[in-house]
Amino acid sequence: MNNKNVLNGWKDPSENPEDDVILLVVYRDNKYNGVFRTIEYMGIEYARKRKDFTLLAWQYLPEWVED
């Protein structure tokens, strides 16, 4: 993880978020080595234990706020 990612709110996979929150995560596909972002509803432990993907980073899912 580099400084640019930290400034954008990405957290290290070993950091623990608040309980019962929806996360925006970055995974690396272990078979094809591709990197992608997705929403994770099942929690950080589920994201960490995925067999097909490696968790690279996470952040709280941004909420849309009307002006």
Image: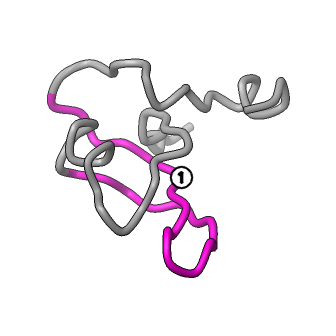
- Please indicate whether residue 14 sits to the left or right of residue 50 in the image: right
Closer to the camera in the image, 26 or 65: 26
> Where in the figure is residue 65, as x and y percent of width and height?
48, 38
Is 39 part of what is drawn in magenta?
yes
Residue underneath mark 1: 26
Q: Please tell me which residue is depicted at 17% across the width and 23% down the height of the picture.
A: 19
Q: Is residue 2 above or below residue 29?
A: above
Which corner quadrant of the image does residue 61 belong to? top left
Q: Please tell me which residue is depicted at 53% across the width and 52% down the height of the picture.
A: 26
Closer to the camera in the image, 53 or 41: 53
Q: Please tell me which residue is depicted at 55% across the width and 61% down the height of the picture.
A: 28
Q: Please tell me which residue is depicted at 46% across the width and 54% down the height of the picture.
A: 54
Q: Is residue 19 above or below residue 26?
A: above
Quarter of the image containing the N terminus?
top right
Q: Is residue 19 above or below residue 67?
A: above
Closer to the camera in the image, 67 or 60: 60
Question: Which contiguous range is marked in magenta?
Answer: 20-41
Three-letter code, disc 1: Val
- Please indicate whether residue 4 sits to the left or right of residue 30 in the image: right
> Where in the figure is residue 63, as x and y percent of width and height?
43, 40
Closer to the camera in the image, 61 or 1: 1
> Where in the figure is residue 12, as x and y percent of width and height?
54, 26
> Where in the figure is residue 34, as x and y percent of width and height?
63, 73
Provide the secondary structure element on which disc 1 rests: strand
